[in-house]
Amino acid sequence: MKHAFLWLAMISMSILACNDQATPETKEKEAPMKTFDEKTFQEKLNYTDHHSYARIEEAVVTHLSWNAEVDFDQKIIKATATYKINNKKGVDTIYLDSRNLNIMEVRRDDHEGALGYMTHDRSNFLGTELAIPISLATQTISIDYSTTEGAAALQFLEPVQTAGKKHPFLFTQSQAILARTWIPCQDSPGIRFTYDATVKVPKGMMALMSASNPTAISEDGLYNFEMDQAVPSYLMALAVGNISYQSLGNETGVYAEPELIEASAYEFADMQNMVDTAESLYGPYRWGKYDVIVLPPSFPFGGMENPRLTFATPTIIAGDRSLTALIAHELAHSWSGNLVTNAAWEDIWLNEGFTVYFENRIMEEIFGADFANMLAILSYQDLNDEIARLTEEGKAADTRLRLELKDRDPDEGLTAIPYDKGFYLLKLIEETVGREKWDEFLKSYFDKFAFQIMTTDAFVYYLTTQLINQNEAWGDQIRLEEWVHGEGLPDNCPKVNSTRFAQVEDQLSAWQNGAEPTTLASDEWMTPEWLHFLRNLPDEMGEEQMKALDKGFGFTNSGNSEIVSAWFEKVIPNNYQAAEKATEKFLFEVGRRKFLVPIYKAVLKSEKGKERARSIYEKARPNYHAVSSETLDKMLLD
């Protein structure tokens, strides 16, 4: 999933320079790893998932048959979840995760009637341990249940909250551990299962899942789904609404409300090219179809990499295809994350760092090296902002790639660190060993570990023995342990230059020296250039300066969410009155956490900031998904 950039402090720069202030902690030095040993590798694959009650070594689910009905009147899902199980150790109990579910009856195939079962509530965010008795003869267990208002993964939208304003809408967001709020499951990234589903929805509406999908509305409101490739629970997904489909290529297409379908199809016209490019880099796309659904604006993230059906925010519909790096990111997850998956959430950088790197390579192939370099520089700026924020908040340990998340909500680990620090580590490896060797390694890595899990320790061991040890100097140049287990950003971070950003900086300098905004050479700028310009504006500006910029470039009423968000961050603390109504409108209509957090922070810095921020939030909060509101509650209500 694309991370929520925090867009905090300005970083003035003409050439990207790496932070040489960090003094990272490293693990105790181990003996050199010369050659690969399978037994050692398997030992390093051992892990503990602190965020699931499942006892992975004892009994696991292998297939889900899900029979469900979506009730928009009550805003619940009524369902039966039937699991095939593998009783690895011949135990008498299988453990599942649930949270705020109404469990009505539990059964198993080798027992007549309802089963007694145990529940244990141990944590607000972990939810309830569901302990179901089984025997050596048990092949399947079945659970009748319904969701409740506490289903944090679900967002039921009223018609007014959609583009068409006529039909309600439902979507899910399961990552990291919210699948348990709408399906009782073993909610761990290390447990994969196949699934089939039958879903009943109101007539006139379409249902879609992270599986094989329809392209037209069913007359009777009944839909059948198959996912014959095993996936972890966080990739379970469901969307229901008045939805249309348009094909974009042999393997690609887009879903959206009818009012958005044409704009969405235009924006994502390069999608088939992206798939072809990704395959040429790192091997075959193994999921059949790659489709995208554009959801209503309350979706809390930029995108979510649900297999076969990426969920995407409408805030990437810019009209010029300049924000499609997000689609490249979610597509890249079809290899890093969906195909080779982090065993536990402490290892999330193995998903996200790889994906940012892969995204950047796709964008380079399609739009050229300088475009990719602009994205890399923006990524570096976000990374430095995040390191500064976490350090200031006393969370320097969270600037390590391999995180410590025991007794913490794994959502706390979804910062820029696993994404951007992970990206720069992989870029460093590429520059050290050479792109040809690095690509060869990655291609074989994705192939060898397809549909399997990976831990940080196992990956470091595999990378070292299979690649880095080919040249004694490489290890000293990369300093892998320092990157993975050290705090901050090592001083051997790659340096990236962009001629296009240099031109932006020239125009910014001209403006600072008195040039009128309308005289700046900005006609050919795309979103990355505008973001670089806005980020480097002075923190303090006068009313006339802001008015002149706004008149020249129309920032306040821009249809590009990235640009308008960056503008609000700059001018709201300077009490720019002309942006007040637009700010409130944006915060009311958009639910993407990446934008909400920095804009609300900007409002808090303005005159009457706390009072105004809380007033806006009180009105806007019902429009937000729980993922966003839980973060904002801590900021604005605590």
Image (spheres, rainbow, N blue to C red):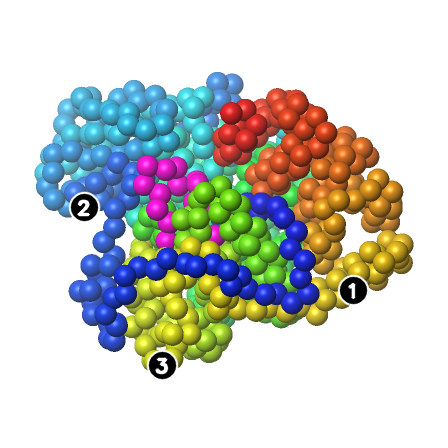
Q: Which residue is mark 2?
A: 57
Q: Quadrant of residue 351?
A: bottom left
Which is nearer the N-term, disc 1 or disc 2? 2
Instruction: Classify 10 Å Cα crowding around label 3: few (below 14), some (14-19), many (20 and above).
Output: few
User: Which residue is nearer to you in this view: 236 or 580?
Assistant: 580
Viewer-side label of 3, 2: 3
Q: Residue at x 71, y 40 (%)?
A: 568
Looking at the rendering, the stretch of residues picked out in magenta corresponds to 402-418
Q: Residue at x 51, y 33 (%)?
A: 631
**Amino acid under label 3?**
Asn
* Image marks 1 and 2: residues in contact by CB distance under 8 Å: no
Which disc is residue 517 wearing? none
User: Does residue 406 belong to the magenta stretch?
Assistant: yes
Which is nearer the N-term, disc 3 or disc 2? 2
Q: Which residue is mark 3?
A: 471
Q: Which residue is mark 1?
A: 506
Q: Quadrant of residue 85?
A: top left
